[in-house]
Image (cartoon, rainbow, N blue to C red):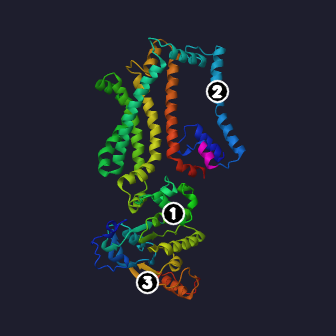
Amino acid sequence: MSVATSAQIGVAQSTSSTAPAAVAEVRGLKRAFGPRGVLNGVDLSVAAGEIVALIGRSGSGKSTLLRALAGLDREGTGHLAVNGTAAVAFQDARLLHWRRVRENVALGLRVEDRERVAEVALREVGLGEHLRAWPLTLSGGEAQRVSLARALVREPDLMLLDEPFGALDAITRLSMHRLLLDLWGRHRPAILLVTHDVDEALALADRVVLLADGRIAHEERIALERPREREHHDLVEKRVRLLTELGVYEKGAVL
Amino acid sequence: MSTYEQEAVGIATLGPVQQTVTEEQATELHSTVSAPRARRRRRIRWQRLVSPLALLGIWQLSHVFNLISPGHLPPPSLIATTAVNLITHPTPAYGSLQGALLVSLERFAIGFALGGSVAVLLAITAGLSRIGEAAIDPLAQMIRTLPLFGLIPVFIVWFGIGTLPKVLLVALGAAVPLYLNTYSGIRSIDGRLFELGHVLGLNRWELLRNVVVPSALPQALVGLRQSLGAAWLSLVVAEQINANAGLGFMINQATQFLRNDVIFVALFTYTLLGLLTDWIVRILERRALAWRTDLVIR
């Protein structure tokens, strides 16, 4: 996806006022569904190579924000810019069941030798043996890995991940976390990860951003090396703060 | 009943799309299937021949014992002989069987190609554009409720008694179910796939080829089957009115000469043609819906 297709909502994109390091820049984004304002002036910028986790209660508008950045929702007003290419992975892997795995990854690719490029990406996510498989024969985790490969193969500057691991079981989710960090380590795209899972956000992100009442209500920076120890005191503290902000923390609760 | 037995039934009958897994595919996917299992499937297939053959035997025997008059229901042996005679010794009254078959087949092919292509074009237009839907669908729904064979007298007035009204009746018979199913197939495409297409930067043509056509295809193929059935029926009816060639003409002539054996030969020929087109659809389905087999077997 090019800058042009995803960049403008309401206000035209202005590169001059955007810091060169920011891959995604959102300022004063508002979006309402009927009378209900979901986003009431969101400011967010994602730096190149940064992993930002966007959390919030359900209905808080996190997916709406991601969809706006992906160019799937153009009804909002405000400033929105994506500098570079973006790729999206959805919660449902959203594969075309009638195309084999490799063709799914190669779909819409504008490079020479797209089949081989797709193949490389699939090997990278550990699916080199499934190039010619039909998507319906894959497990949920495998399908999601195809979806990651499909996003990755476009060599995006920004990966928009909409709860990509939300439908997976706990064990698969952990191995997907490792895979995502591994891929990020090699390709260094900026990642905006929408999730409802505080632990997932804490395990992966450089920055956890909490969306509430249509605004960025809270932000935590995490400087720890990855992979991270879940019980690290810094993470435990941040977890308590985030859960409190989300309004679900009770003193003495087991985290 | 095990999955495999159900499958075998699906193969042998003209079952709905979900059951059109072929044995070859099943074997291919389950190459590790145990030998007794494969043997049992083969046996089931063979068993399905028993009742038709038994019926044929009883039919023939009832003539051997003079239980039925050949004038009312000719025995299978007579029908077979008559068929051979009609092929090898054409008569002025009936012409030859292969000649009649070609005439009928031609009417069918032209009518079906015409009706089918118009139906698919209209369905795509109505399915993908709001203006197209507003313009086309109400008319299509009206035509759907029109009694097809009630049009025959009108068609004769308009188009005479030649080939044209017959071809047009076949076209109309074919078009209606194909349009309805293709249109509803396109309408029920998952909107999230269009989003995906947008995200992947697919152009219109890629979207049509990768999303629209494959999504709508299962339903369109259901429509194709119904459409073929309707087209054959239209042909049979149309051909028996004012025809001077073709299988319907042969039936008309035979009626006048009280030759039930000839009528049966013509009817069986229609049946064989119907089976032939059905077989073609099944090959199409097998190729186009291969991705679904896994779902069915799982």
Residue A173 higher or lower than B249, as above or below: below
Gap in Å between the C-alphas at discs 3 and 2? 79 Å
Depth check, mark 1 against mark 2: the one in front is 1
* Of A131 and B223, the residue lying toward us: A131
The residue under label 1 is A120
Name the subunit of mark 2.
B
Gap in Å between the C-alphas at discs 1 and 2? 57 Å
Kind of residue at disc 1: Val
The residue under label 3 is A219
List x then y, in percent, for residue A223.
Answer: 49, 85
Residue at x 52% of width, y 69% of height: A166
Residue B26 magenta: yes
Image disc number at residue B53: 2
Residue at x 57% of width, y 51% of height: B294
Asked if labels 2 and 3 touch by Cβ distance under 8 angstroms, the answer is: no
Q: Secondary structure at mark 3?
A: strand
Residue A155 magenta: no
Kind of residue at disc 2: Leu
Residue A92 visible in the current orientation: no
Asked if labels 3 and 1 touch by Cβ distance under 8 angstroms, the answer is: no
For the stretch drawn in magenta, the main secondary structure is helix
Residue A72 higher or lower than A53, as above or below: above
Residue at x 52% of width, y 20% of height: B265
Depth check, mark 1 against mark 3: the one in front is 1
Kind of residue at disc 3: Glu
